[in-house]
Image (cartoon, coloured by chain):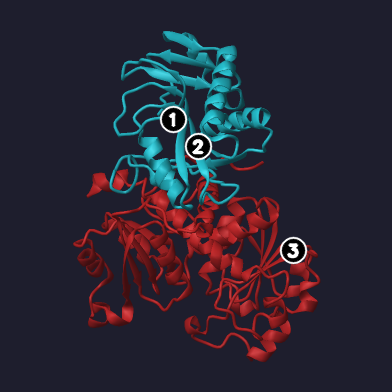
């Protein structure tokens, strides 16, 4: 049972994986498949979004995601404006909605937003006519990361349905884990979360995932092993005795990887902490697809921009 | 596909399977006469792709040279969709594949129907992002007139006089299950 791709995205925004139907996810992955080819051309640029403006509103540090969006925007010929919290009026006490309304006066077509607060993109999407793309909101969602992860899995395995995917690390503070679990279960994959009890969120089952407190049983037969960073910036208390102990119990080492299926893919959304959640031998090993994830991220973000450019009927009526 | 709708409206067949076979053979003869067999045929999605494949097969038979075929998707270069045009749906992207570089090659763009010329304009823009061909030529199965841009075909299978609001329907076995060309007053639009 492969999911038939939708003809278009239903909404004007991409605020998360939660509101997407499986057929819409399929459409994004199929579109990215064709856009991947643009990076291999002598002229790595197509005119699909010429004349449109994208504001990259990053209220949290980011290099990978911000660069990835910016490359995607430029390859589609959009004009880009970069806006980061440290240099903006946000530090002078302006609210998010006021900041965005002021930006709207410059008539952008898209706002890509990363924000430490859950729901910031959803709030903007309701009051701003531009298409809002969530580039990570607090511990809630990071939809383009989940899409690029799924794209990478599909590229290697030819399907998502039935894949056994282990996601290990700081699940509780991870928007990547949430978006991935939402997406993968919609597409018929099996998701296994592994973390110390202090780093597992409540309501794992609601995300369609199974929780494990140890790596070894979760890794059995796994097709994909995705490791997550310990997000010390989001933790109020210390959740485990030491990084050394964390490594001993939860790091992906060559010995542990051997428990997974022989050609299991090793993934990491970055930034990696070598020697904490992942051993260098695994991170740089033959099963690692970590750098492919970065390449695929550009194609996925191009696909989202391309598809949302066609779906602004509702927004035009609202504004 | 929409064979059920075939009976509902007036349709005039202008080319049947045998007629199409002869037409393609004539097009190949024109290509050979002009450029020999060392050409790159590039089909424009959707029906240009199987047409290019057929022409390549015939061309290979005629010249005993293996002819290369590519596929071109023009969606990212169209002038009728994009964020500056609200109320539209983005076209579903299809594969673009060129077997070799286009630098210094003689490239034939292949499509089923030449109408406004806007598809060909987009195809030219797409092609030049891949390199600098020695020459680009245009081969179409049907030229139905009503150009909106200064574009002309080099090889034409059949010229048909049409009204602007008429429909030219090309069926190819690879896509539609049968071969033929019809003019009708309603049905599937074609560019």
Compared across the picture, whether B176 is left or right of B73 comes to: right
Displayed quadrant of residue A317: top left
Q: Which chain is red?
A: A
Residue B90 vertical placement versus A76 (above, below): above
Q: Are marks 1 and 2 in contact (CB under 8 Å)?
A: yes
3D distance between C-alphas at marks 2 and 3: 49 Å
The residue drawn where x is 78% and y is 67% is A260
Q: Which residue is mark 1?
A: B154
Q: Nearer the viewer, mark 2 or mark 3?
A: 2
Q: Nearer the viewer, mark 1 or mark 3?
A: 1
Compared across the picture, whether A40 is left or right of A15 comes to: right
Q: Chain of mark 1?
A: B
Q: Chain of mark 3?
A: A
Q: Colour of chain B?
A: cyan
Q: Which residue is mark 2?
A: B108
Identify the image quadrant of the N terminus of chain B.
top right
Q: Chain of mark 2?
A: B
Q: Which residue is mark 3?
A: A222
Q: Between residues B15 and A163, which one lies in front from this camera angle?
A: B15
Q: Which mark is residue A274?
A: none
- For mark 2, give the secondary structure: strand
Compared across the picture, whether B48 is left or right of A218 comes to: left
């Amino acid at each position: 049972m492969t999911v038939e791709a939708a003809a278009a995205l239903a909404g004007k925004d991409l605020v998360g994986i939660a509101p997407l139907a499986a057929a819409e996810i399929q459409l994004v992955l199929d579109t990215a498949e064709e856009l991947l080819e643009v990076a291999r051309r002598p002229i790595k640029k197509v005119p699909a979004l010429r004349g449109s403006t994208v504001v990259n509103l990053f209220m949290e540090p980011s290099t990978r995601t911000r660069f990835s969006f910016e490359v995607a925007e430029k390859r589609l010929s959009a004009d880009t404006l970069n806006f980061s919290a440290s240099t903006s009026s946000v530090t002078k006490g302006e609210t998010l909605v006021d900041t965005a309304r002021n930006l709207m006066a410059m008539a952008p077509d898209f706002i890509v937003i990363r924000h430490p607060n859950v729901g910031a993109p959803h709030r903007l999407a309701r009051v701003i006519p531009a298409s809002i793309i969530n580039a990570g909101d607090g511990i809630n969602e990071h939809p383009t990361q989940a899409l690029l992860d799924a794209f990478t899995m599909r590229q290697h395995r030819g399907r998502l349905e039935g894949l056994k995917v282990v996601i290990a690390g700081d699940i509780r503070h991870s928007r990547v884990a949430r978006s991935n679990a939402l997406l993968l279960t919609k597409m018929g994959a099996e998701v296994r979360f592994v973390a110390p009890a202090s780093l597992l969120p409540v309501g794992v089952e609601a995300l369609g995932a199974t929780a494990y407190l140890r790596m070894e049983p979760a890794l059995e037969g796994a097709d994909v092993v995705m490791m997550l960073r310990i997000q010390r910036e989001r933790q109020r208390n210390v959740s485990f005795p030491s990084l050394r102990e964390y490594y001993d119990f939860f790091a992906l080492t060559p010995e542990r990887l051997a428990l997974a299926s022989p050609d299991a893919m090793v993934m990491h959304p970055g930034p990696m902490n070598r020697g904490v959640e992942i051993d260098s031998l695994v991170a740089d090993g033959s099963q690692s697809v970590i750098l492919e994830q970065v390449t695929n991220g550009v194609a996925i973000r191009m696909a989202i921009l391309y598809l949302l450019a066609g779906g602004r009927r509702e927004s035009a009526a609202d504004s | 596909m929409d064979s059920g709708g075939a009976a509902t409206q007036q349709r005039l067949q202008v080319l049947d399977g045998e007629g199409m076979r002869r037409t393609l053979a004539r097009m190949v003869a024109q290509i050979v006469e002009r450029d020999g067999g060392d050409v790159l045929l590039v089909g424009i999605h959707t029906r240009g792709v199987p047409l290019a494949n057929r022409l390549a097969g015939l061309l290979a038979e005629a010249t005993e040279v293996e002819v290369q075929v590519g596929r071109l998707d023009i969606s990212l270069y169209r002038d009728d969709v994009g964020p500056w045009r609200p109320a539209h749906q983005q076209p579903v992207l299809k594969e673009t594949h060129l077997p070799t570089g286009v630098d210094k090659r003689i490239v034939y763009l292949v499509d089923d129907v030449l109408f406004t010329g806007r598809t060909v304009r987009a195809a030219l823009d797409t092609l030049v992002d891949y390199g600098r061909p020695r020459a680009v030529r245009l081969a179409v199965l049907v030229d139905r007139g009503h150009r909106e841009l200064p574009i002309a075909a080099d090889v034409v299978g059949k010229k048909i006089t049409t009204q602007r609001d008429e429909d030219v329907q090309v069926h190819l076995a690879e896509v539609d299950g049968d071969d033929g060309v019809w003019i009708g007053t309603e049905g599937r639009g074609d560019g």
